[in-house]
Image (spheres, rainbow, N blue to C red):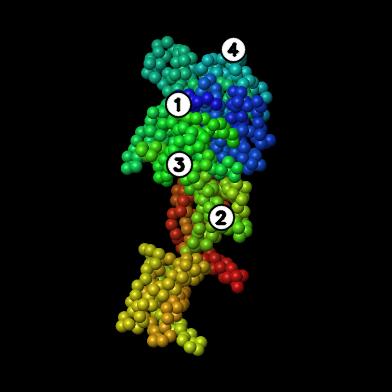
Amino acid sequence: MKEYTTESIRNVAIVSHGGAGKTMMTEAFLFHTGATTRMGKVEEGTTVSDFDEEEIRRAISLYTSVIPVEYKNVKVNFLDTPGYTDFVGEVISALRVADSAIVLVDSVAGVEVGTEVAWNYIDEFKLPRFVVINKMDRENANYRKALSSVEEFSTTRLLPVQLPWGEKQSFQGVIDLITMKAYKGEGKTAEEIPAEYKDAADEARLTLVEAAAEGEDELLEKYLESGELTAEEIQRGLCKVIRSGSFIPVFVSAASSGTGIIPLLDAIVNLLPSPVDGRVEVGQTKNGQEEELTPSDSGPLAAYVWKTTADPFVGKQTMFRVFSGTINSDTRVWNSKREVEERLGTIAVPRGKETIPVKTLHAGDIGVVPKLGETVTGDTLTDRNHPLILSVPTYPNALYQVAVFPKTQADSTKISSTLTRLAEEDMTLSWHNEPATLQTILQGMGDQHIDVAIRRAETKFQVGLTIAEPKVPYQETITKKATAMYRHKKQTGGAGQFGEVHLRLEPYPDGEFNYTWEVFGGAISQSYSASIQKGIQGVMREGVLAGFPVRGVHVAITDGKEHPVDSKPIAFEIAGREAFKLAFKDANPVLYEPIMKVQITVPEANMGDVLGDLNTRRARVLGMDTDKGRSVVTAMVPLAEMLRYTTQLRSLTGGRGIFTMEFDSYEIVPPHITAEIVAARQKELQKEE
């Protein structure tokens, strides 16, 4: 592959709901530009971009693949993203390094939930986009209906640049409104527009020319005077209105048969921005100042690491985009986030699983380098003398949790490092040890997401893991004042043990724990204070009511007794522990549970079902709103009721509902539920005995 300078590069993310044909579109681009000799098939596992064994097994994209396509002396880096909403992190990472996006819409299904999610992220990144109505050769294909579904959803005006030449089985090509020519099949040769489409094409062209004229004052003047613009002028005006986000052009295709592929490639090369015309990238200097970066080879080096993968055969692969400066093979760069130097070996351009070695990558290009020691996703590679940090996008909070257990003793030693590596690769995966339940918790976006991570641990890192539903991290506390005393006395011949502790327990709402010494007159020596506190804190970790950590208590040691010979630190530790338990049981103990702030977005038709379901989950609805024709519910819901909500919401809404969730506060568990939790805990303890 030859070297491409910044002006000759396009970075285009292809996004949509699962099954709209993104992977087949990249196959068609490769095949029709001569990069491959035959088109692969998703169901046969022979496509260039779905090469991972899990992707082949499931027949869906799980990761973003880079597919560079060379066409008319331009290199288009297509980023083929997953459509399933569990893997939205991959979409966000791809959009972070793209200059534009293509939104595929299935000609039968129209806009679906995955399309909506991706669309909102494109808005967030402020990227220009194309809409391509794909699969126009499907049995129930309906161009008008699919276009209307996008128009209803989009706040930006849509602008057809092509019309379909036929529909369903009779879809044979596209009618281009810029050149006013028809293109059959893949679209290499132009012909006259068939008579039956002429009127529709003339009418649609009028709208197109008006929109193009809005791009420049000069064009608008000419259009108002003469009522016409040349094809070159239309293209120039369209570039402006597309890049400014005033209009979204609409194209048609049937990627799996290759229909309309070449005209679409022409439009990508002619209308979508190169890195030079793309968004302005801002780097942060060491002292927190912002520095605007121009995408040029002469600028300071700034390369953003947007993806890392581990491969047992090749080792770690690091994918990056050069936003400024150039990167050469066999050089050293500075990781400004980790403050370490990294030695780059052979730099390559990725194409699916294949890597094509190159000597230099220019500003704006995407590359891959193997075996970097410290660098992870979200880092910036720069020059040591001019360190810069590029911003990392915000990824959604985890929606689904599992407790993870090692399959064997050997796996238990590797579990932490494996989970850390998985989380480094995927910004929407995270893990932690939950002190309240003593479980290792892995969190992600849904059951499929977690399932893929667990299988990846097994195949890539040879670590066997099993999963279970996690326990809820409840907390125990008290609601009133109580006092207690406990005497620990042990005589077993020889030196005995003796310690007596009197204490007072009070609610301490402002913090976790407070401890004071209120013993007057030296009834017990203060040297035993640390032992008493140790005993109390041991109980607080283990819990009294149902085995969960205690929080929000103030303990005052008020009195006690000691023995001149038999009193020892261990005796006071035990006395402190038992006195605390007695006082705790008298202080009206309660359980606290984590409450999540949840925002659920569903089609209006599903609103009643969702609200009914929320009522069964002890939810407190805060408000309802509508956004782009969809209903949005905001509610406070206990975490215990949300553990498997991703799956349940999908079944309630036919996959069209989405939600976000974040921790808000702790609240008291209702008494009848507390009784159930305590009973379950007693059963557990009996089993252990």
Q: Which mark is residue 415?
A: 2
Dot in front, 4 or 1: 1
Does residue 590 appear to the left or right of 682 in the view shown? left
- Which residue is located at x 46 percent, y 21 percent? 238
Question: Is 100 rendered above or below residue 195?
Answer: below
Element carrying mark 2: helix
Residue 189 can be seen, yes or no:
yes
Report whether residue 95 is seen.
no
In the image, farthest residue toward the left: 521
Residue at the spot 54% in from the left edge and 48% down from the top edge: 422
Q: Residue 525's mark? A: none
Circle 2 Cα neighbour tier, 10 Å, few/some/many (<14 / 14–19 / ≥20)? some
Sequence-first disc among 2 and 4: 4
**Which circle, 2 or 4, is nearer the viewer?**
2
Residue occupied by mark 3:
342
Mark 3 → mark 1, Cα distance in angstroms: 25 Å
Q: Amino acid at mark 4?
A: Glu
| Amino acid at pointer 2 | Ile
Tell me which label, 1 or 2, sits earlier in the chain.
1
Labelled disc at residue 192: 4
Amino acid tagged 1: Thr
Residue denoted by label 1: 6
* 546 to the left or right of 284: right
